[in-house]
Amino acid sequence: MTAVRRSMLFTPANVRRFIEGVWKHSPDMVVLDLEDSVAPDEKQNARDMVQEAIPLAQRGGAEVAVRVNADTVVEDCTAAIWQGLCAVVLPKSESPEQITALDSLLTRLETERSMPAGSVEIMPMIETAVGVQNAYAIATSSRRITSFGVLGEADLTADLGASFDALQHHDVLAYPRGEVGLVARALGLTVNGRAWTSGKATIADYGDIEALERSMRASWLAGCRSTFCIHPRQVAAANEHLRPSTPDVAEAVEALRVHAEADRARLPYGVLNGLVIDAKIAQAARHIIEYAAACDAKDAAKASSRAEIEAEERDGPV
Amino acid sequence: MSVGLLMGDRYLQVTGDEKDDTVEWRLRDASRKNGKEFISAAQHAMLPPVERVTIAATPEPAADHSGAIPRSVLLVPADRPEHVRESLSSAADVVCLDMTTAVHSTNRETARLMAWGEVAAAASSSKSVWARIGVDSFREDLDACVWPGLSGVVIAADSVERVRLIEEALASLEEERKLPQQVGIVVALDTAAAVWAVRETLAASPRVMATVVGAHDLLETPETIALRPSYPDPVYMQGRITAGATEAGVPMIGLLGTDIVPGHLAEVLGQDVGKRLTQAAKTSRDAGFIGGMTTHPEVIDSCNTAFPGFHPPLPALQLPPPLPAMLQPVVPSYFEVKPEQSALTPTASAVQLVAASNNGVTPQESNTWRPLAAPRQGETPYPLSATWRPVVPSDFERSAQKS
């Protein structure tokens, strides 16, 4: 089944209360954070808690990843690579050597801890100018990388010397987004991250719900499949908009019908509302229908897990 | 006068009329059926003892188009001879026989069968003749259409190797068939991989004579997210293509910049379609494109109007006469005026300003503070690789292979 990871919600790994309640927000993926949302003197505490936190965060049907610190990758991974973990988010990814080193480390830990080889993915965060410059080399440096994109708007903006406020009016990240997005598409990787829209809808600013939804919709149309969230509001918007809408699916079904009809009549293409439906568009329509079904399946699985937890909390453990 | 030709698996009948100097051609049509039935009937008619005839005379193209700028390229399905004939009387600069997308998969063989006659017919008109061929069937398609009169083949390519393959196939066919002309390659950029490698791909061969940008295709691949191209502003891709094509010295063909996309049929776009199409062509011209490619004959006039059809010479740079030395403006620098204030230590007010924007921490107090966009000090934390590398197998894959 296609992996559906519309919303990836950061949760500090050292706050048990947050991890126990994260299922209420219904993210597709929980990212246990050891980096920015954990204070320096809490790092060791957070590391100690990760193994226990993985099954807790999985309740509610979410996948679980961990964000490590770029300068303590070995310590963080040693603490965090346990059964159930699907990915390591590597901040400040700047070179392929960094990825190959992490790849070896993961392979060793997987073997030691009897986990399936290659089961832990690497999600590099491109958030520095050097990272953008080396995007292609990074994306091709390990088969553990299955998705790619500019994930780290705030840090990248700062590294480029640009003002974060300017993002409201002008896409100062147009070039990095284009370059990294093109690399992802050229290599057949899933595109992560967000497209630019005007207004307050950056990862750090989620106050304007209308701007947030517009941003998510634009991201979907630009080909992005998943985005990081730091607030439950973003989770809801991502789950709703980073997927084909109901009219999209209806149009895709209609397009397939038109194409089948044309194919029977041995015409190279059919026409639907003025849009040429050839083999390529028919393939696109199939993609849309399949991905919508995968999203529905993910939502249904999450809903049933949530119902179980709610019943358990109401009636006590079975 | 009528001549029948059997070339490989093609059988053609060419009829000349001496009075009005035209050449009619048609495939031998024993069964008057189409598609597969027609091909099998034609193949049946071609079984021995019919003699194989090699072509002696080669029809010369009516005009030399080697230096012509294709303002308008009209795509016509190669399995529809009536459309091809019609297109020859259109205003298009180039007629491009489409042997792929516009031909149903069961009719591709018919299209190949017909290509020879169509190339010959189109070459005897005043048009340049191109053929759009499939990536998966490029050898068969080239074999079918590389004949005297063809000046270019349009094909999707995303790497140097791909262009070289096509180049070799073209060269051997030209040699074998003693073609009077060299066939050019028009690279269609329709995948993300092609845009990524645009500069190398377009510079791979001197035969690459143009590139076609298929905005529709580009925005839809490889993982499609909507039926209609909806990317808000593909500014990066356009920039990359323009820079790569310019560096390789290859002109760009395509229409962009409006809500009119190649997948839309012109007739549903409303009354002012002509005006909107012309605007699209002008936008493309201003973005550096030299012509447009289309399946809609309505678009041809717009392209011919908007694209100049030649490269306008750049006006010579007019430099103002140099100023006499004594009239050079000299603005005294700050350090000349107030030397005591010019040292590179921040003034007290500047420190306060920085502190205010940095949570009250001044640069001197904070060891992590660095000004925005400051150059990195010393070495980067990780050594940077000198060259890009292909995907390397991961550790876990290597160990799986060993075991």
Image (cartoon, rainbow, N blue to C red):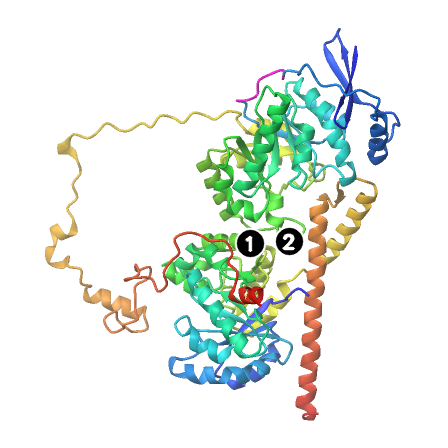
The residue at the point 17 percent across, 38 percent down is: B329
Disc 2, SS: loop
Q: Which residue is mark 2?
A: B224
Query: Three-letter amino acid code at disc 2?
Result: Thr
Query: Percent from the top left, x then y, of residue B252?
Result: 53, 35
Work out whether residue B316 can be spotted: yes
Circles 2 and 1, Cβ within 8 Å, touching? The answer is no
Work out whether residue B297 can be spotted: no
The residue at the point 47 percent across, 85 percent down is: A48
Q: Residues within 10 Å of mark 2 (few under 14, many from 20)?
A: many
Label number found at residue B20:
none
Query: Three-letter amino acid code at disc 1?
Result: Leu
Marks 2/1: CA–CA distance:
14 Å
Left or right: A37 as drawn, with respect to B87: left
Q: Is residue B14 magenta?
A: no
**Residue A71, quarter of the rendered image:** bottom left
Q: Give the residues in magenta.
A: B61-67
Q: Residues within 10 Å of mark 1 (few under 14, many from 20)?
A: some
Residue furthest out toward the top: B19
Query: Percent from the top left, x then y, of residue A288?
Result: 69, 57
Camera-side mark, 2 or 1: 1
**Residue A311, quarter of the rendered image:** bottom right
The residue lying toward the viewer, choosing from B215 and B336, is: B215
Disc 1, SS: loop
